[in-house]
Amino acid sequence: NDAGGVFHKPAVELHPEIAESYRKVIHTPMDFSTIRKRIAKYRSFSEFQEDLILVFKNSCTYNKDGSEYWKYAKENWEYLDTIFTQVF
């Protein structure tokens, strides 16, 4: 659940002030708008799943452990893992 829109667009688009440092740390950015653009191009569910996980992994990698963004990403990542575990 991304009610706050934190992951809807690229992080550097939402927060241009972090663009330089973000690009140094995150080499494969991912967000929900990019996933939506790619949706028809995924060849398997696992490719889609990897991109979803990457959204939250990137946030946890870039943001400080325990920060608001880190906690939000970690919570969503764990929820996603729970769904994938129950379905598969």
Image: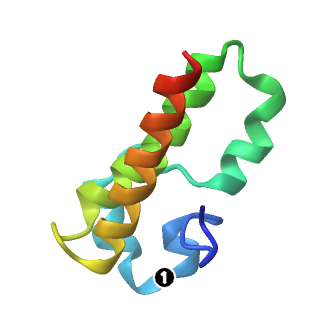
Residue at coordinates 27% horizontally, 62% vertically from top-left?
62
Q: Is residue 88 above or below residue 19?
A: above
27 with respect to 41 (left or right): left
> Is residue 25 positioned above or below 47 on the image?
below
The residue depicted at 56 percent of the width and 64 percent of the height is 7
Residue 5 against residue 87 in the figure, above or below: below
Q: Quadrant of the C terminus?
A: top right
* Residue at (37, 79) in percent of width and height: 18
Residue extending furthest bottom?
Answer: 17
Q: How many marks?
A: 1
Residue 37, located in which quarter of the rendered image? top right
Q: Which amino acid lies under the numbered mark 1 shown in the image of this protein? A: His
Q: Residue at x 54, y 72 (%)?
A: 6
Looking at the image, the residue that sits furthest to the right is 40
| SS type, badge 1 | loop
Is 10 left or right of 59, judged from the image as shown? Answer: right
Q: Which residue is mark 1?
A: 15
Q: Nearer the viewer, residue 55 or 10?
A: 55
Location of residue 32 in the rendering, given as x and y in whole percent from the top left corner: 65, 54
Question: In x, y percent, where is residue 52?
Answer: 54, 41
Q: Quadrant of the N terminus?
A: bottom right
Residue that protrudes farthest toward the left in the picture: 65
